[in-house]
Image (cartoon, helix red, strand yellow):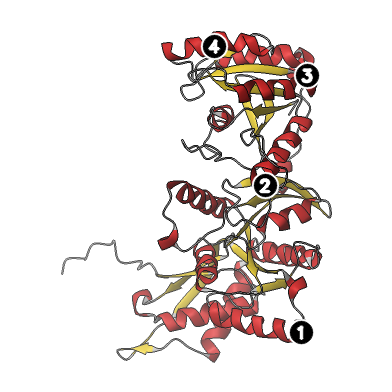
Amino acid sequence: MSFTVAIIGRPNVGKSTLFNRLVGKRLALVDDTPGVTRDRRFAEASIASLEFNVIDTAGLEQAHEDSLQGRMWEQTSAAIDEADVCLFLIDSRAGVLPDDRTFAKILRKSQKPVILVANKMEGKPGEGGYYDAFSLGCGDPVPISAEHGQGMADLHDALVNAVGEEVAFPEEVEADDEENRVLKIAIVGRPNAGKSTLINQMVGDERMLTGPEAGITRDSISVDWEWEGRTIRLYDTAGMRKKARVQEKLEKLSVSDGLRSIQYAEVVIVVLDCTIPFEKQDVQIIDLIIREGRAPVIALNKWDLIEDRQETLKELLLQSQEAISQVKNLKVIPISGETGEGLDKLMEAVNEVDAAWNRRIPTAPLNRWLEGVQYHHPPPAVSGRRIKLKYVTQAKSRPPTFMVSSSRADALPDSYVKYLINSIRKEFNLDAVPIRLFVRAGENPYANKKKRNN
């Protein structure tokens, strides 16, 4: 992308709504509650043929730097520093408030190009606030309605004027196939397990808002990162509490956003607090990941707090095997998001699991395996008739999925299907990833032929 735009403004003026409008999909959570956005969120955006990067930010609030609002302001300040242009939003229906004037001064001091945007201009109620906006000293306001998509052409022209046509429309270069090489990793877990701290340690920057308060993260925020020459996209997600305890609408939206991140990811790192690991909610999260067909890796965070590490790790490995029986030999890696201890081993486990999740096995060795399985442990006889498995093939990877043709698919016991899954996992080194195996009836070559007359 040619340039970066940061959306700035006090709480509840429609920054995330405009962000979603520019991106073309609902990436940011939107609610009437002020202060929904806390971290800064990056995405690729466009208006017609104009393409750029956009940053959604927390609402600007004056607060002590050690408070949550103060740390949110630090995230917004970082967005201003990173941006080439700032879109300064005001709510035209509410008019110009004292906070608008305060932050107009902050933006002018930044010496970044500022485009004043008067949002919520649908209908007459916004006209008064639009004219008041001229008094902010940030140039002529651009009237828009982010919710209804009005005024986007004017915003397009204002952005082009702010950066210049050479920057706005750079010469096209041949793009490589970078997106196909991006490994998507979702970071999930219960509240306050240390997910955002882990991501900050990975990328080497205070990219995510952190603190002692549980539930700071609300949106699922993506961060691009390079590890040993490989491009990785990390998704930080909101903490997932027990469903019965999730009552507020905003928390429900946050959890739903996190669940979508799991669906988009390839590998999911489940961050557990090693001082209270494998609680019921942890197991339910891992079970959900497996049912979605994603590859899980368990990160035992806060390992720097453990004294008897060898004995503790041995006990936690046993707990993982007992609590999660659907996938054998899960990768369980002790780490410290605070100090960075264990991150190399964590990423090595991620690479191994990703390779297994993407593995394709040729049909010939699969069928040799099937012959051996039936020789050493044949399927049971049902009603005096032996069930025969004819052949097997891999239908797809991501996760590894296999189809077995059988003479009597409906009669094959579930216990034997589980035996086949465990055997194929061991034979082809598919540890730590979910495997799907379907048994279908072989086609009868005479089923569609008409009976001959006597």
To which residue does mark 1 refer?
A: 310
Quarter of image, res 331: bottom right
Circle number at residue 177: none
Image-quadrant location for residue 348: bottom right
The span from disc 3 to disc 2 (Cα, nearest Å) is: 38 Å
Disc assigned to residue 167? 3
Mark with earlier residue (4, 1): 4
Which residue appears farthest toward the left when viewing the image?
Answer: 454
Q: Are marks 1 and 2 in contact (CB under 8 Å)?
A: no
The residue identified by callout 2 is 67
Residue 360 appears in the rendering = no
Q: Earlier in the sequence, mark 2 or mark 4?
A: 2
Residue 135 percent location from the top left of the image: 63, 10
For marks 3 and 2, give the one nearer the viewer: 2
Image quarter where the N terminus lies is top right
Q: Is residue 359 above or below residue 34?
A: below
Q: Position of residue 46 (x, y in %)?
A: 62, 25
Q: Residues within 10 Å of mark 1 (few under 14, many from 20)?
A: few
Identify the amino acid type marked 4: Tyr
Amino acid identity at mark 1: Gln
Q: Which residue is mark 4?
A: 130
Is residue 355 shown above or below 124? Answer: below
Query: Residue 249: percent from the left, percent from the top?
Result: 43, 47
Distance from Cα at disc 2 to Cα at disc 4: 33 Å
Sequence-first tag of 1 and 3:
3
Query: Mark 1 and mark 2: span between their CA atoms?
Result: 38 Å
Quick one: label 3 or label 2, which is nearer the N terminus? Answer: 2
